[in-house]
């Protein structure tokens, strides 16, 4: 772990998952561009490390999610909280920015509140899906909450929180697409590009990648010229992915490519994607990429989730549109037969594919305007000036 250098103008930013790491890194970049004297200490992932003045720990690589996994990281949590407590006492940061990852960040909020250090919460947890008490905690402890979905603003304001809907940060980084009225029927020789997005954490990849690769090969048995593209997070080594792929097909290297990119150019060219539930589903929609959504989790986690989740969908696309536009296959239904069946039903029906893309096209307008990180950075820097 890196030592924290003595500084006079410092803020701390904490994220714990890959999407939070991405959006926090973009915010850090803009903050430092607007105020070159600002020093940013961070806990997060590889993207944040690249942009920060001082980096403490790669929390994203730990990958503790769900209801039971965080308990396995208890001693790491205790160690990190001890480091952050020392940092607060010694460096007295101007503010702390918490990015999603409530399970860890709510403890940091308590430490900061006790020391009168203001906290800004960027990308608050999806409390409208489960555990509404978290919204009350954030509303009480955060100086300001920056929401990324329009319906979140009312949730926090009703609880007395200072909150603004700032727009979704994906609008700043994910390219859009154009609609076409030309319906093209593609034969079995067409070289379909098939995205494989099993998740960004090792546990998710372990549960989904094998299933998605098998689904791809079922598709390839008909569309023989198709190629698969696995979109991998920077924390996941190629060796980990290749090990899983080879259990399906030892020669898969010729059919499937591992992609690491920041500009979404290859991802936007996909004809279809097998996608794990999460931010990836919204990214696909903003690029007009048809998909089927799947998710598997440990049985105990799923049983708990069924009891407390109060929305009918798991994918952000369906949640935003308030209807089942994309197929969701969970637990035992997340299998190669059903996944490939849904892929065939879309790729073999151009009219269905175009109808889905039209629905996707409307989502961008529901998520606000570009310039999200820029607007948030202004609010934070204006506070620091006062």
Image (spheres, helix red, strand yellow):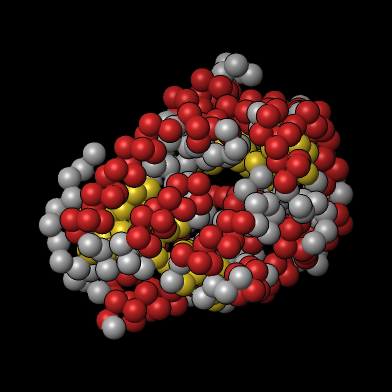
Q: How many marks?
A: 0
Please tell me which residue is depicted at 58% across the width and 62% down the height of the picture.
136
- The residue nearer to you, when weighing 4 against 116, is 116
- In x, y percent, where is residue 274? 68, 40
- The residue nearer to you, when weighing 363 against 184, is 363
- Quadrant of the rendered structure where residue 194 is? top right
Q: Is residue 218 visible?
A: yes
Give the left or right position of residue 219, taking residue 266 as reference: right
- In x, y percent, where is residue 246? 56, 18
Please tell me which residue is depicted at 46% across the width and 67% down the height of the picture.
142
- The residue nearer to you, when weighing 319 against 137, is 137
- Quadrant of the rendered structure where residue 22 is? bottom left
Please tell me which residue is depicted at 43% across the width and 33% down the height of the picture.
74
Q: Residue furthest front?
A: 114
- Quadrant of the rendered structure where residue 134 is? bottom right
- In x, y percent, where is residue 264? 52, 54
Give the left or right position of residue 107, taking residue 42 as reference: right
Please tell me which residue is depicted at 52% across the width and 62% down the height of the picture.
138
Using the image, determine if residue 303 lies above or below residue 111.
Answer: above
- In x, y percent, where is residue 292? 75, 44
Q: Is residue 166 visible?
A: no
- Which quarter shows the N terminus? top left
């Amino acid at each position: 772990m890196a030592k924290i250098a003595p500084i006079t103008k410092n803020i701390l930013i904490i994220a714990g998952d890959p999407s939070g790491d991405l959006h926090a890194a973009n915010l850090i970049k803009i903050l430092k561009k607007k105020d070159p004297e600002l020093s940013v200490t961070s806990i997060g992932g590889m993207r944040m490390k690249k942009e920060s003045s001082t980096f403490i720990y790669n929390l994203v690589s730990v990958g503790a999610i769900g209801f039971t996994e965080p308990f396995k990281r208890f001693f790491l949590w205790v160690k990190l909280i001890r480091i952050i407590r020392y940092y607060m006492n010694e460096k007295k940061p101007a503010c702390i920015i918490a990015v999603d990852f409530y399970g860890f960040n709510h403890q940091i909020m308590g430490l900061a509140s006790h020391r009168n250090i203001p906290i800004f919460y960027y990308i608050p947890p999806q409390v409208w899906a489960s555990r509404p008490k978290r919204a009350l905690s954030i509303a009480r402890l955060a100086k300001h909450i920056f929401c990324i979905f329009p319906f979140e603003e009312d949730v926090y304001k009703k609880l007395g929180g200072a909150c603004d809907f700032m727009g979704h940060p994906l609008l700043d980084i994910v390219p859009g697409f154009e609609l076409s009225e030309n319906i093209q029927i593609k034969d079995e020789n067409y070289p379909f590009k098939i995205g494989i997005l099993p998740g960004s954490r090792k546990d998710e990849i372990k549960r989904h990648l094998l299933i998605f690769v098998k689904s791809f090969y079922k598709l390839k048995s008909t569309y023989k010229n198709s190629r698969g593209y696995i979109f991998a997070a920077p924390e996941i080594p190629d060796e980990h992915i290749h090990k899983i792929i080879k259990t399906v097909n030892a020669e898969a290297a010729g059919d499937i490519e591992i992609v690491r990119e920041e500009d979404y150019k290859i991802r936007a060219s996909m004809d279809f994607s097998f996608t794990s539930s999460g931010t990836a589903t919204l990214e696909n929609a903003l690029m007009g990429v048809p998909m089927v959504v799947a998710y598997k989790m440990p049985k105990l986690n799923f049983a708990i989730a069924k009891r407390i989740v109060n929305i009918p969908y798991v994918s952000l696309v369906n949640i935003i549109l308030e209807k089942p536009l994309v197929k969701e296959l969970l637990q035992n239904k997340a299998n190669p037969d059903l996944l490939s069946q849904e892929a065939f039903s879309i790729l073999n029906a151009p009219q269905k594919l175009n109808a889905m893309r039209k629905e996707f096209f409307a989502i961008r307008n529901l998520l606000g305007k570009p310039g999200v990180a820029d607007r948030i950075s202004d609010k934070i820097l204006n506070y620091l000036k006062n």
